[in-house]
Image: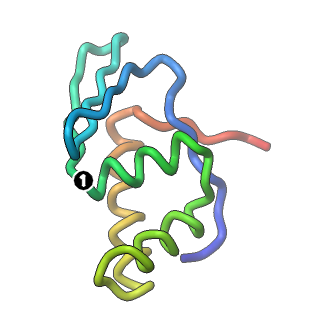
Amino acid sequence: MEKQKTPRLMSNLIWREVDENTVVVSPQSGDMRVLNGVGSVIWRLLAEEQSLEAIAAHITAHYAVSPEQAGADLRAFITDLDARHLLEWPTA
């Protein structure tokens, strides 16, 4: 995965881990999103402010996917979260 800015979770979100899933609520919009097991792992790593490169490496190491597939899947997931206004991108 190419190096790029690392997104952060929007600070106004409420989220809780429930079993293997993560429930994310945006108080501003009232929207709710439920993340599956892999999505929850990515969410947790984003909460720890891990780089996208480190997250892709984690996915490759813990799931039966190639680095290319992990990168592509991560980019798609990040794009979805961004479209739902769940991420912010630091300027520095």
Q: Residues within 10 Å of mark 1 (few under 14, many from 20)?
A: some
Q: Outermost residue toward the front?
A: 19
- The N terminus lies in quadrant: bottom right
Q: Quadrant of residue 34?
A: top left
Q: Amino acid at mark 1?
A: Gly
Q: Quadrant of residue 22?
A: top left
Question: What count of labels does the image hold?
Answer: 1
Q: Position of residue 12 (x, y in %)?
A: 48, 17
Q: Residue at x 34, y 62 (%)?
A: 76
Colour basis: rainbow
In depth, the one of 68 and 38 nearer the eye is 38
Q: Position of residue 86 (x, y in %)?
A: 41, 33
- Name the residue carrying label 1: 37
- The C terminus lies in quadrant: top right
Q: Is residue 26 above or below residue 38?
A: above
In depth, the one of 40 and 7 nearer the eye is 40
Q: Secondary structure at mark 1?
A: helix
Q: Is residue 37 above or below residue 1?
A: above
Q: Residue at x 30, y 29 (%)?
A: 24
Q: Residue at x 62, y 46 (%)?
A: 49
Q: Residue at x 42, y 79 (%)?
A: 60
Q: Position of residue 23 (x, y in %)?
A: 25, 31
Q: Position of residue 84 (x, y in %)?
A: 32, 36
**Along the horizontal axis of the image, is 30 left or right of 5?**
left
Q: Is residue 25 above or below residue 35?
A: above
